[in-house]
Amino acid sequence: MRKYVLSALTALVVLSPSAFTPKTALASATQSPASSIVLSLNTTSTQAIVGRSSAVGDFNTEVASPAKATYAAGRLKAAQDTLARAGLKTEFAAEYLAAQDRTGTPWQLIASVHMIETGQSGTTTVASYAGAQGPMQFLPSTYRAYALDGNGDGRSNIYDASDAILTGANYLRAGGAARGDYHSAVFNYNHAEWYVTKVMSVAHRLGLK
């Protein structure tokens, strides 16, 4: 009997929401030998940065139902088809959708910035004339301010596509994308009207209204 009681208590501890409560979003910045920006994160949560309600966490202990799995697969396929029709790469569709879910920035806008910045590069060590780096072309100082962990390894690397895409979405959110002010969000990303025009042209091809 004691054995079963202990097992039950253990299960309660494991499934307790407090065990998954995010503590802090950003801890410290370090440089890798290749001069990339790699930020050590305590959790993958966006709550401290994007201000999400504590009732909506990034850690979900609920087992996905078949219906949810089917919906997720269908949603991913729809995004991939939309990207393909617009002539864009489909390999980052899951990252775009995940970034939208965590920041509120439309995935079409995220993909468009990624396209205009680096042609949807998966990783790049080439810096722009202004010093911007990585797949989403961030200045290191800006990346540090908005960095999020996109691949769950506890760090945010400016050259990692998953990290950079999520961080780019967070930066667009801060500029107004989550509330529908796409012009301001894109202009905040790169202060040039021609840049806004190019990004929004791609976004509209992807169905962003």
Image: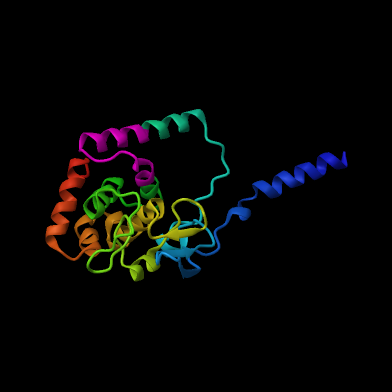
Q: Is residue 157 left or right of residue 194?
A: right
Q: Position of residue 173 (x, y in %)?
A: 32, 58
Label tally: 0
Q: Nearer the viewer, residue 58 or 123?
A: 123
Residue at 36% from the left image edge and 44% from the top image edge: 97
- Quarter of the picture holding the N terminus: top right
The percent coordinates of residue 28 (x first, y second) are 49, 70
Question: Farthest residue toward the front?
Answer: 33
Magenta region includes residue 54: no
Q: Is residue 78 magenta?
A: yes
Task: Indicate the quadrant where residue 88 lies.
Answer: top left
Q: Write the residue at 23% across / 69% down.
A: 130
The location of residue 185, given as percent across then percent down, is 24, 60
| Residue 42 position in % (x across, y down) | 54, 62
In which quadrant will I find the C terminus? Answer: top left
As displayed, is residue 62 above or below residue 66?
Answer: below
Magenta stretch, main secondary structure, is: helix
* Residue 124 in which image quadrant: bottom left
Depth check: give the residue in front, 107 or 157.
157
Does 188 sit above or below residue 15? below
Residue at 81% in and 45% down = 6
The magenta segment is 75-97
Tell me the residue at 59%/53% (across/down).
20
Query: Which coloring applies here?
Result: rainbow
Q: Is residue 96 above or below residue 195?
A: above
Q: Nearer the viewer, residue 81 or 52?
A: 81
